[in-house]
Amino acid sequence: MARKVFISILGTGFYDACKYAKDSFISSETRFIQQATLEYLKVNRNWTTRNSDGDIIDRIVILLTEGARETNWDKGIIKRLNRKTGQEESYKGLEQVLSDMKLPCPVETLSIPDGKSEEEMWEIFNLVYEKLKPNDELYFDLTHSFRYLPMLVLVLGNYAKFLKNVSVKHISYGNYEARDTDTNEAPLMDILPLTILQDWTFAAADLIQNGNIAKLQELKEANALTPILREKGKKNLNRRMVEDPLDSYVNSLQAFLHDMKLCLAPNILCGNNMNKIRDCHEQVKDVYDEVIAPIPPIIEKIEQSIQRFETTDTMHPESIRNGYEAAKWCYDHQLYQQAITILDENITTDFCQRLGTDEWVYEQRNATNALLRYGEYRDVDWKKKSKDESEDADWEGVKQIAQNGVALPQAQDFISLMRWDAVWIHNTRNTYNHASMTQDKEKILSVEDIIKLGKIIKRVLARIR
């Protein structure tokens, strides 16, 4: 059971009383946003003091400078001077207010410096971070966070997500200045969507830069956009209509990455998963333009990273170019073994199609690859070797196709352009796949080989029609 932790900074100002409102919620009249926020979070109903082992679980942490402790916290406070009116008024400190709420979990104070220097900034950061435990659920109130502290809290949240696996469940701001003077109600603003958008941005960047979809999947499975959709609830949105296109989009991206990491050339060439990505991309853009405007540009950035792949259809059921693009995509995402494997096999498939041999028959494929690497027809490469091949297979006819095809200009052009790169690719792929455990110890792969692979991929892509 995760521990809930509410963190708020108390200021030194003289706070006038008002009610804070959000949707159907209206708080008690209070001088302190902390009281209103804890009411909104239903702390008295949903938070606990101890777990089944007797350990104290949830807690409320109030950050106090020395000035805030003296002016707005201590139970001994009963009056304060209102500088606007010049009159002293009855004034109860937050310590007493929270005590009167009879909260089910402990209230702690954390003394912090005023934050007037970099050293004090880092001291605050470390003090708050040390208060957190692994897997905590964090609830932040930023209303009285002075100067850079709102930024510090946002950065701290991301830092703790990474190092302590915490989750940020709530961030709010009480906008007293925007209150309705007739009702004396001020908005309680939920700014958690900003951090959620930040999470989606980081997840998309991880996908684009590293080919890693794990963070995007986590956000999807955690329904991370739900808090934003809840904000849009007054528009009577059907949440499934909004969430389903995003689910389909992330699933299609996962299928595409699966093709790349497992070198599934048949899927890559037919492009079905790429077609699904493009279909879902349009749906997501259409839906989220109306709901969460910042999301479509993130989706667009992902689309740009795969835009060089070709769309296939019934008239063009596969694209040999997609094999070359897949090799480049894998190389760009540090999937070097997949890159050289896909590139080697795609060159062979390309030559089979140009030559007229069957790319799906192992012997023909092997022999076609040898023809390309040696640059000429060798009868020894075209001997029937498979015991599984039916006796009536026209192997002599296949040999004739190869002999005739290799003389064609399109085959000669391909051999001229690809031969020496194909030889290097094929040999280097074998070295790579055998972890450089070959008899020739001088052929151990090096960083220079990886650099050369990248140059060859660019060169091959520039050559193909």
Image (tube, rainbow, N blue to C red):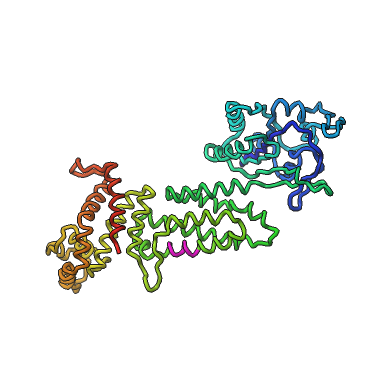
Task: Please identify the quadrant where the C terminus is shown.
Answer: bottom left
140 in magenta: no
Question: Which of the two residues, 243 or 323, is positioned nearer the viewer here?
Answer: 323
Q: Is residue 416 left or right of residue 263?
A: left
What percent of the width, then of the height, locates residue 294?
58, 53
Question: Which of the two residues, 117 or 385, is positioned nearer the viewer here?
Answer: 117
What percent of the width, then of the height, locates residue 461?
31, 58
Q: Is residue 368 above or below residue 315?
A: above
The span shown in magenta is: 273-279
Point 58% across, 26% down: residue: 119
Q: Is residue 350 left or right of residue 170?
A: left
Q: How many marks?
A: 0
Point 60% across, 53% down: residue: 225
Q: Is residue 367 above or below residue 432?
A: below
Q: Quadrant of residue 67?
A: top right
Q: Is residue 231 above or below residue 149?
A: below
Question: Which of the two residues, 305 or 105, is positioned nearer the viewer here?
Answer: 305
What percent of the width, then of the height, locates residue 255?
44, 58
Point 19% across, 68% down: residue: 409
Q: Is residue 311 left or right of residue 86?
A: left
